[in-house]
Image (tube, rainbow, N blue to C red):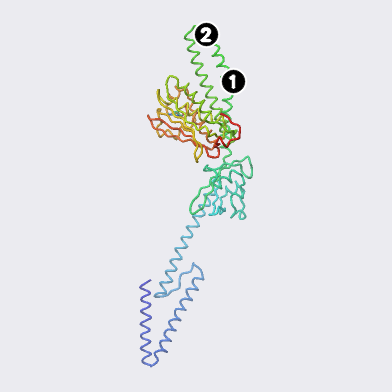
Amino acid sequence: MTTSWVTEFSRFLWFGGIAALFGLLIGQVLAVLLLYTLAYLGWYFYNLRRMDHWLRKGKKYAPPAASGLWGELFNEIYYLQQRSRKRSKRLVKLLNRFRETTGAMPDGIIILKEQGEIEWWNDSAQALLNLKYPSDVGQRMSNLIRHPSFIAYVNGKSDEPDVTIASPLNDQIKLNIRIIPYGKDQSLVMIRDVTVVQQVEQMRRDFVANISHELRTPLTVMSGFIESLQEEIRDDPQVERALQLMGQQTRRMQQLTEDLMLLSSLENSKNTSRRQVVNVANMLASLKEEAEVLSGERGHTILLEADAEVALRGDPKELDSIFSNLVINAVNYTPKGGAIRIRWYADENGAHFEVHDTGVGIAGHHIPRLTERFYRVDVGRSRATGGSGLGLAIVKHAMQQHRGTLQIDSEVGRGSTFICNFPPDLVVYKKDKDLDETG
Ligand code: ADP
């Protein structure tokens, strides 16, 4: 194109020179040059008109025939047109494929603009939320779903990555909603019908709670009979040993059913724990005594540093469960003569309960799984200590009930530290307290 432009310009100068010579010959240089320039301009307008006509006629027509710079211009435009036509065809195809794919998805998808207004949705989102085109375009999600949990989630007041709520159309249908930011301040909303999953989960919880409850009475009867038999039969060492083992196993089963029932009730209650001001320092003092009894001949050094000024608003039963599970574990997983340090204090981040032991420790890869039900690092050792494998699962759920977190630091052979962090709004300083107190 550059060379054509240079050729064209040289041609213009050449012909201009000839015109000037001719003008000199006839003694009318200016008039001839003016005529020449007008003729040149006319030719340009003629070609411009041809281009305009061609562009207006439509893309399908071949470009007008022309030589030199104009010919090249026509060809270049024609080539660009062809390319952009192919590209838009490809884009339309891609867009249709995207529409078909998202339309076939069982999950609802909504695209939100920078300010959170709805820009686009797929068929499933339309069915799940009864979205209407075009009236709902530009609406905010919080105008369509007014559920308080969803509003808290949208406003970033929830720590969870998603939220499950009853459908605004039918409260029997449960929807799981997740907002994923992408691009420049845009968001993708994924909506999934989790009604069946929730039903199955509820059935599982009910089953565990019911079976534990049903086992409770027979186990109490059995342990009662075992105890009376133990008192009556004292002359046969073999039977005595058998009764002792039966007693031990029955107690284990009782502990297991108690733990399972507690876990089910924690899972079923949604932060509805009975809140009271709990005197944690008192609670820990009695726990320390229990730990010393449990330690027995193992002679652990058990230290307690508890700030008596710091109380906590919470459920006393659940808090006792958290503290005792962690302290009992520290005793059980620390060899003879080891040390256990229990701390309770508050700072600007909230209240903290720490149990540090110089016990066997836990390898790093086990730590993320410790709060799973029945997860044990060393099954043999855990059985020997009488552990049900549910202790840390209970701690995790009870902490969630108090909007707290559980932090575990451990090193094999050196010991472990379990830290429970409670949010600042649950902390009550004794001097401010005017409520009943438990613990
Ligand atoms: P368990 O009833 O078996 O003690 P938990 O849920 O309380 O069950 O603990 C899960 C596992 O975590 C235990 O089996 C044990 O291997 C490990 N664990 C818990 N606390 C400690 C600790 N203080 N030191 C070492 N290992 C621990």
The answer to whether residue 55 of the structure is visible from this angle is yes
Outermost residue, right direction?
170
Q: Is mark 1 within 8 Å of ligand 1?
A: no
Residue type at numbered disc 1: Thr
- Report the front residue among 69 and 211: 211
Q: Which residue is mark 2?
A: 233
Q: Quadrant of residue 376?
A: top left
The residue that label 1 is drawn on is 217
* Viewer-nearest of discs 2 and 1: 2
| Whether residue 106 is visible | no
| Tag 2 secondary structure | loop
Q: Is residue 65 above or below residue 235?
A: below
Q: Label 2 crowding class (10 Å Cα cut-off): few <14, some 14-19, many 20+?
A: few
The residue lying at 47 percent from left, 34 percent from top is 419
For the image shown, how many numbered marks are present on the structure?
Answer: 2
Question: Nearest the camera: 404 or 136?
Answer: 404
Screen quadrant of the N terminus = bottom left
- Where residue 212 appears, as percent x and y from the top left, is 56, 25
Q: Residues within 10 Å of mark 1 (few under 14, many from 20)?
A: few
Labels 2 & 1 near each other (Cβ < 8 A) = no
Element on which disc 1 rests: helix
Where residue 298 appears, x then y in whole percent?
42, 21
Residue placed most toward the observer, 56 or 347: 347
Task: Say if 365 sits above or below 251 in the image.
Answer: below
Quadrant into which the C terminus falls: top right
Q: CA distance from mark 2 to mark 1?
A: 24 Å
Q: Amino acid at mark 2?
A: Ile
Task: List x then y, in percent, for residue 163.
Answer: 56, 42
Give the mark nearer the N terminus: 2 vs 1.
Answer: 1
